[in-house]
Amino acid sequence: MIHDSAIRTQLVTGEKTLHDVTTEICRPIENKPSTSWKVGFVLSVIFLGILGLTLAITTLFGIGTWGLNKTVQWGWDITNFVFWVGIGHAGTLISAILLLFRQKWRMSINRSAEAMTIFAVMCAAVFPLFHMGRLWVGMYWVLPLPNAFGSLWGNFHSPLLWDVFAITTYFSVSLVFWYLGLIPDIATVRDRATTAGRKFWYNFFSMGWTGSVRTWNRYEVVSLILAGISTPLVLSVHTIVSMDFATSVVPGWHTTIFPPYFVAGAIFSGFGMVLTLLVIVRKVMNYQDYITIGHLEAMCKVVMLTGTMVGLAYITEFFVAAYSGVVYEQYAFINRATGPYWWAYWSMMTCNLIAPQVFWFKWARTTPWFIFMLSIVVNVGMWFERFVIIVTSLHREYLPSGWVMYSPTIIEIGIFVGTFGLFFTCFFLFSKFLPVINMSEVKSILKNRE
Amino acid sequence: MIDKNLYLDRNKTVIFGIFENPDSFLETVGKVHSKGVDIIDCYTPFPIHGIEKAMGLKRSLLPIGAFISGSLGFIGAGSLQYYTMTYDWPIIIGNKPSFGVSFVPVWFEGTILFTAFGLALLFFIRNKMLHGKMPSERVDMRQTDDRMVVAIASDNPAINKSELTDMLFNGGAVEVKERTNHGYEDFTDVNLTRNN
């Protein structure tokens, strides 16, 4: 039974029936891809090729091909890693935390946001894996296997190993959550399938789903438990990523505010990327009735809130550095704002703290092209945040003899650009072969059911 | 509760009521159940809240399974770290104790990982779901699209067939049929009509 509020706006507009939902969401799967899809897909594959090429060069010649030098060992590489992991946080946040809070607007966006999470974490994994240099040896550096020369194990005191566990757990749990949610929808596609190929593959992945109430009953229990355990998981992942920095003694990193600050930043950047994708998806795939202005507005509010939280963290860091009386900390922060990388610092401040404040105005929250522009600004700003933290702290450490400037090589730029190829190739395939909107959940919130 | 697979047995007959409105479906299922009629199962394209109560389903035991698999993860992650870092080859790093708070993150992640995978696995086992398995109970091809189906054994002691048919039609069923199964996806359907 649905008890509608008289005040709230409808979550799905256009007076849809149950059957409308099925046909409209299955349309891209059942028809030939559009020209815009083909163009976008080919472009993404070209960028994916750049990734393959630059990674091959890295593997053949070693990470000397990167611009990392003695002191800035974590230049673009870890900047991009943290950037992508951060983006990966919106998906599980939307599907898990909003499920616990009974926020029904999550239902039309959770599927694509979760897909985005999985693809973003895949992109993130590229960087630390290849940063290990010899990838094939690296496998036992991260896995708890005894060393070949004796029984020296992986170091569980190290935040870097915590990170390996956190990210692999996050990736695999998100994948399980995503796949479980997909099963009923895959079964819907299976039962509508007309071609032999579609019948076979959707039957294979639907695992014999029939929509039995006994199964639904268990499914709901499983969703709730998975949401319950994913919520602390989301918070733990970026907390642990922040500990990679916070447990060190590098000025500018050695900060207790890092965990909440990183989590807020991750949600901020994740929602930024969700907005970038969904503003396009709703337009190109004609899903304005499912992903309404109301959805965009709600996400803009989250962006504004988390952007302000991140901004508050930037200012708090400055205050704590000043108040601590530690000259190294004070220098690190003065250097960030006024040193050789001042432009990166002020780009970060402008994009993350100042720009999202326009979302106080309703017009800004309800105009898709403007939201799209601003979501790009948020993505850029969050990339700069990681760049500022990593590069400005490392290029001026305790010993002035280690003071250097850092700039990326063409290979590093190629890998970064290439990960966008990987991300969008996966996203295009997803939008062609799987229902982009969770049909079974959306059907349960339709107002007009006659 | 009648065995779910009953109507798939040879020559067993089942009555299916097919609905298009979830609210009247829920109401009718509740009414049929309160008459003392055993409902074999219902099939819906989306989770209808409250139907498990209307059908008289028991609470799932999966949370207990989740707890057990989580506990295994807790013990596993803890003993792995204890064995490698404290028992087998203790290393003092940054003067941290060889067994202490630096084990918490991996401990936590291990517990979550095992809970999620254990739960998903138990869910598939409990539902007898497997990759590539053919769906066993497709009454109507639109049961995953926009129709809801209730399956009731036709030789029901609590109610006679015509009374049940009328009850389903009065509750809003668009179609009521009686199916006799001969084998997998091999059956004879008889469409039942309203009696009065």
Image: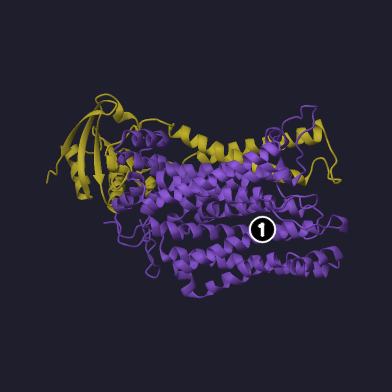
Chain colours: A purple, B yellow
Q: Residues within 10 Å of mark 1 (few under 14, many from 20)?
A: many
Is B20 on the left or on the right of A440, as rendered? left
Picture coordinates of residue A436, whole percent (x, y): 42, 50
Is A31 on the left or on the right of A103, as rendered? left
Q: Image height check: is B125 above or below A276? A: above
Q: Which residue is mark 1?
A: A262
In depth, the one of A340 and B150 nearer the eye is A340
* Residue A66 visible in the picture: yes
Picture coordinates of residue A311, whole percent (x, y): 66, 68
In depth, the one of B22 and B144 nearer the eye is B144
Q: Secondary structure at mark 1?
A: helix
**Disc 1 marks which amino acid?**
Phe
Is B69 on the left or on the right of A329, as rendered? left
Q: Quadrant of the N terminus of chain A?
A: bottom left
In depth, the one of A51 and B82 nearer the eye is A51
Picture coordinates of residue B6, whole percent (x, y): 32, 29
Picture coordinates of residue B183, whole percent (x, y): 27, 24
